[in-house]
Amino acid sequence: MRYISSLFVFGLIPAFLSSVAAQTWTSCNPLNTTDCPTDPALGTNYTFQFSNSSAASVWNTTAGSIHYGDDGAQFIVNQRGDAPTIQSEFYIFFGVVEVWLKAATGQGVVSSIVLESDDLDEIDWEFLGGNTTHAETNYFGKGNTTSYDRAIYYPVDKPQENFHNYTVEWTAEKIDWSIDGAVVRTLKYSDANGGANFPQTPMNVRLGIWAGGDSANSNGTIEWAGGLVDYSKGPYTMSVNKARVTDYSTGSEYKYGDKTGSWQSIQKINGTSIIAKKLAKGPALTTQQKFNKLSKSSKIAILATIGVVILIVLGLITFCCIKQRRVGRRERIAEEARYEKDRAELMQDPAEMGSQFYESQRSRY
């Protein structure tokens, strides 16, 4: 079946620009050239916990900066031009992307989950800061924006207040969008313009936030985003607690075999993914984590050694202080002796000068 946008149902106007313009782009389009680099495969499944920056070891920050805390990765719009975004270094060729996300508040502010391929196939979740009851699903094939009738909104409980699991399951036959485990939308291959607009080439994952309602954007984009952004009421924060990504294909890399952009043309290069190897090693441990992994006896030995070092250092400091005090006392005594000597000499000089004056005066008479 063909899906008709519910933008009109909610009184919105279709955007004239891509609804995720801040996150959608390609550095090399395989539809135009055969010289594009291969895409590094995930080739496995992995859960990224975004409570600290180590989870982002295979993600690139493509715009702005990301903050990490108890709520996970925080993407913040604080002023005009802010559009913090991360993009996975890896690609999946069909698979599942699950993201636990709390959308940003703010009229005109757009939180987004985007799957994007080099030839601009695209699958989206989008959340408008002024829409507190619905989330938007969308897709594009080969960057085709000749129509904006693909977006459909679905109810979700307080998306700006609560974390929800937003999932995309993507195969060669269909795409399922799910909220908290319940499928809300299914797009079959044949329903996307006979497959011509069906996303079907290797995709990376992009998470970000941007100001769709910035005054510099087109009127259509501003109206779609819900109106102009009031930056004085910010900052506006999107939080991502974790993401679980599963690649249904295996291999080390994906390569476009021709310029058709069909899934049948994609070549899977055998081998173990560099990304998978990197993830298998795990993030670099902090000093505290390394200490916690030690045996009890090793911990005791380390603490005892630290204690001895501290005692030695304190002893050296004490010795130096005592020595310095002694040196200072001797210097003070010597200085006092010099002072008394100089004082005595000064007292003696006037007396001698007086006696000499008396003798000289008496000799004159």
Image (spheres, grey):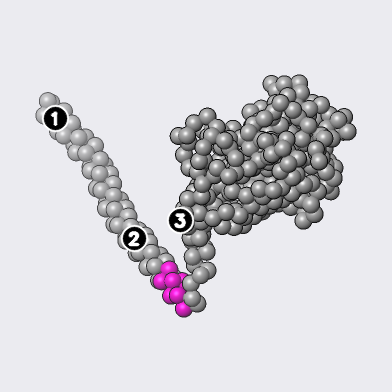
On whether residue 301 falls in the magenta region, the answer is yes
- Of the 4 image quadrants, the one containing the N terminus is top right
Q: Nearer the viewer, mark 3 or mark 2?
A: 3
> What residue is shown at x 83% (from left), y 43% (from top)?
154
Question: What residue is shown with label 2?
Answer: 320
Please tell me the numbered disc located at residue 360: 1
In the displayed structure image, the side of residue 355 where residue 76 appears, left or right: right
293 relative to 263, above or below:
below
Q: Position of residue 93 (x, y in %)?
A: 59, 48
Picture quarter with the C terminus? top left
Q: Residue at x 38, y 64 (%)?
A: 313
SS of the residue under disc 2: helix
Q: Which residues are the magenta region?
A: 297-306
Q: Secondary structure at mark 3?
A: loop
Query: Quarter of the image holding residue 115?
Result: top right
Whether 340 is drawn above or below 148: the answer is below
- Left of 272 or right of it: where is 345? left
Is residue 63 visible from the viewing direction of this image? no
Give the mark nearest the N terminus, 3 or 1: 3
**The image quarter in which residue 182 lies:** bottom right
Numbered marks: total? 3
Of residues 164 and 95, the one drawn nearer to the viewer in this rendering: 95
Name the disc covering residue 271, or none.
Answer: 3
Image coordinates of residue 155 in percent, x first then y, are 85, 45
- Amino acid bearing label 2: Cys
